[in-house]
Image: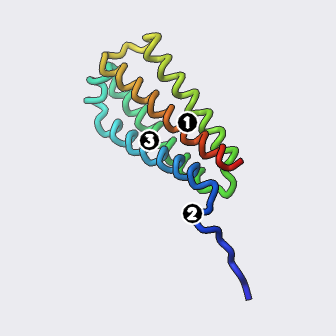
Amino acid sequence: MTAIVNRPLSDSTDSLLRFAMRLDAVLTGALGLGIAMAADPFAALTGLTPAQGYVIGAAFVLYGLAVYSLAAMPRIRRVGTVLAAFNGVGTIGFVGIAATGVLALTSGGEAVVLACGAYTAIFAVLQYLGVRRLA
C-alpha cells in the first residue's frame, strides 16, 4: 500500500509567494504582448521607436514565461528572494529613467515609466512578504 500525503492549500506557507510570482508573470507577459501588438501607438505615446516597443514587449513576454516556470519549483525561497530584489532594482531603474531624462520620453512616456515603477514596487513587496512568510 502506498500513501500520498499532501498539505491542503489553506495550510501552505508558500502560497502567497507562488501566487505573487504567477500573477507577476501573467500580467507582465500580457502587457508584453499588448506592447508588441501595438508598437506603433505605444511609440507615439511614449516617444520611443516601434523597434524599441517590440524589444520591450518581447522582453516582458520572456520574463513572464521565465517567472511562471520558476513559480513551479519545489523550493522557491531563494528564487522569490532574487525576484523580489530584481523587482526592487527595477523600481529604482524606472524611477531613475523618469527622473534623469536619459530617454527622450513624452509626458505620456514618463507616466508609463512611472506606472511600471509602481507595478514593480507592488510586486517586490508582495514577493518579499511571500518570502517572509516562508521563514
Residue underneath mark 2: 10
Callout 1 environment at 10 Å: few (<14), some (14 to 19), or many (20+)?
Answer: many
Residue 75 position in % (x across, y down): 69, 54
Look at 35% across and 37% down and name the residue there: 36
Residue 108 position in % (x across, y down): 30, 21
Residue 109 position in % (x across, y down): 34, 21
Q: Secondary structure at mark 2?
A: helix
Look at 31% across and 40% down and name the residue there: 37
Q: Which mark is residue 33?
A: none
At label 2, the amino acid type is Ser
Rendered image quadrant of residue 132: top right
Residue underneath mark 1: 124
Cβ atoms under marks 3 and 2 closer than 8 Å: no
Mark nearest the camera among 2 and 1 is 2
Mark nearest the camera among 3 and 2 is 2
Q: Secondary structure at mark 3?
A: helix
Residue underneath mark 3: 28
At label 3, the amino acid type is Thr
Comparing 126 with 76, the one in front is 126
Look at 49% across and 35% down and name the residue there: 122
- How much space separates mark 3 and mark 2, taking CA atoms? 27 Å
- How much space separates mark 1 and mark 3, taking CA atoms? 13 Å
First along the sequence among labels 3 and 2: 2
Rendered image quadrant of residue 78: top right
First along the sequence among labels 2 and 1: 2
